[in-house]
Image (cartoon, rainbow, N blue to C red):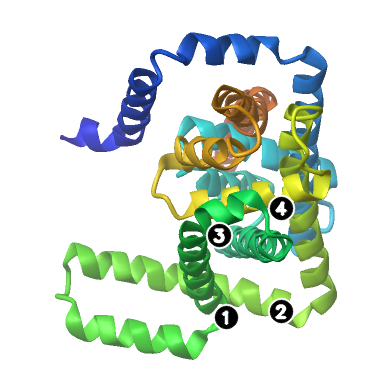
Amino acid sequence: MKTLKKYWKWLLVLALVILVCLANRQSLPEILREVGKTPPMVIGAACLLSAGYFLAEGAIIHYMTKRYRPEFTCREGISCALYCAFYRVATLGSGSGVAEIYYLNTRGIEAGTATGMSLVQYILHKVAVALYGITGFIILCIQGDAVVRSYRPQMVLGCILTALITAVLITAASGKKITARIFRLLDKKLKPGSKAEQKAHTFRKQAELCQQEGGVLLHDKKALLIVCLLDAVKLSCWYMVPWLLFAGTTSLSLPDTMLLTALIQTLAAVIPCPSGIGAVEYVFSLFFGTYVSGVSAVSASLVYRFATFLFPCIPGAALAWRHFRWNKKRRMDRIRNNNERAGSQR
């Protein structure tokens, strides 16, 4: 049972892949041929845009970390972003935050501070995704876009859910009075020592760390503005990728493609799938299938997944291995120094 819990995400993804292959078994060979026809230059350009995302992510980590450790470089921030990208793939999303906390802790940032930074960074990212996507929906609605006319009810529902989730995250980061009341109510309702009470205690600690770091950032308006702008830049790098993949095959302009991709990411985020695997591809194929053939839309979604999810894992894996060896050597040196110090005292 424990093994099943440990690998349930991978089993779910495997089941989704099998179901998708079975549902598209007639068109699957054509989809794979379409993927194979994608010019290497286009795939390379898509990967470069994806690299731009992680450069901006690294800049955010650097900017938020240098307040506590001024010698923390932008290069270390980019390495941290790619390190987390590897664990995002290895754990299907759940381990990337822990990986960032661990990486920063090995660079001299206290675990509590690193946790607060990671949580605030996550919330600001989610807020940026939501605002970008909802803005895309509004603009495409005004333009009378074909895909909006076809799927307006689903889009409205998705945007409402996104807005609610965003409101909860913002409250967790800044609403000290509201969260205090919620946790006091939970303390009264939950049985002491129960699993639910332990989880509530964990959430309380995370909320406190998040509010502490969030308070620091909210008081520094310039820092908050820079982080928000970097979030917009990094998301834009990903949202430009479909325009490269569909260049010459659709009438969509670059801004419209970016807004539609932003909407796709926003709506896919409310579907409970590990790392959005399956959800992004489904919504991507559904919406872009309005402008191109279904085969082209599905093949483009696979290339998009490779560029934004799998490609960053390659340098991330190399950095994770290098960090593992560096940290192992650091621990061994520390043990040796302690042994030498103990020997000299004798």
Contact between labelled residues 2 and 1, with CB atoms less than 8 Å apart: yes
Amino acid on which disc 2 is placed: Leu
Q: Residue 115 carries which label?
A: 3
Q: Quadrant of the N terminus?
A: top left
Residue lying at 53% horizontally and 51% vertically, measured from the top left: 150
Q: Judge from the rendering whether residue 160 lies leftward or rightward of residue 263; answer left or right.
A: left
What residue is disc 4 on?
259
Q: Distance between the residues labelled 2 and 4?
A: 28 Å
Please state if 269 lies on the left or on the right of 33 as rendered: left
Residue 3 appears anywhere in the view? yes
* Comes first in the chain, label 3 or label 2: 3
* Residue behind mark 2: 218
Distance, label 1 to label 2, CA atoms, is 9 Å
Could you tell which of marks 1 and 2 lies nearer the N-terminus?
Answer: 1
Q: Which mark is residue 184?
A: none
Judge depth for marks 2 and 4 and give the one in front: 4
